[in-house]
């Protein structure tokens, strides 16, 4: 769990609250504490704002769920832009996932097709994911077959 606070920024056009990324674990639950906008998701190369809805969770599919579903559910690229006049606070819960300690496509979801991702132990996945995050890359890309 994490609490994120983004202070107001008068030069918001020159600052990125959080750079574009996908979440590395299984599922992310985000609760907007206030009604300040800033979260955006990317779809088809364009950025779309996610309007805060009081009391509602934003649910992001993350990279491990992408692997488990063999790409049926894609992880969501997102970013946060600061607001010029208002601060923004969110509470985020990150949930990991694995099957028997492995991150791999679930057999029941292959539907006769081939796996799109290699199998990896959860501990190795987490290490690789944090290294990739520090390098500004996506670890999930290294698992593609």
Image (spheres, rainbow, N blue to C red):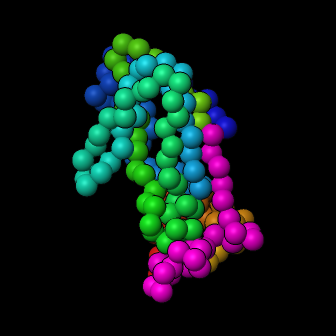
* Nearer to me, 73 or 140: 73
Q: Residue at x 54, y 30 (%)?
A: 31
Q: Against 90, is 66 above or below?
A: below
Report the residue at 49% width, 72% height from top. 70
Indicate whether 137 appears above or below 115. Answer: above
Q: Main secondary structure of the magenta part?
A: loop
Q: Is residue 97 magenta?
A: yes
Q: Is residue 82 visible?
A: no
Identify which residue is drawn at 25% across, 55% down. 44
Tell how many labels.
0
Residue 53: % across, % down: 44, 26
Say which quarter of the image contains residue 123.
bottom right
Residue 19, x across and y down, in percent: 41, 42
The magenta segment is 93-118
Q: Quadrant of the N terminus?
A: top right
Of 49 and 82, the residue lying toward us: 49
Residue 46 seen by the camera: yes
Work out whether residue 87 or residue 10 is closer to the camera in this orientation and state it: 87
Is 15 situated left or right of 64 in this image?
left
Q: Residue at x 37, y 29 (%)?
A: 51
State the image coordinates of residue 10 (x, y, percent, origin top left): 33, 16
Q: Residue furthest top?
A: 85
Residue nearest the viewer, comparing 136 with 37 = 37
Which quadrant would residue 5 be assigned to in this image? top right
| The residue positioned farthest toward the right in the image shown | 100
């Amino acid at each position: 769990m994490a609490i994120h606070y983004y202070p107001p920024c008068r030069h918001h056009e020159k600052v990125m609250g959080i750079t574009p990324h996908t979440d590395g674990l299984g599922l992310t639950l985000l609760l907007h504490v206030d009604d300040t906008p800033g979260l955006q998701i990317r779809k088809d190369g364009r950025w779309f704002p996610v309007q805060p809805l009081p009391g509602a969770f934003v649910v992001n599919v993350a990279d491990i769920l992408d692997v488990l579903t063999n790409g049926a559910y894609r992880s969501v690229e997102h970013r946060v832009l600061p607001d010029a006049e208002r601060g923004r606070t969110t509470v985020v819960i990150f949930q990991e996932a694995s099957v028997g300690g492995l991150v791999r496509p679930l057999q029941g979801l292959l539907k006769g097709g081939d796996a799109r991702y290699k199998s990896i132990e959860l501990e190795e996945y987490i290490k690789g994911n944090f290294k990739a995050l520090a390098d500004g890359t996506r670890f999930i890309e290294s698992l593609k077959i």
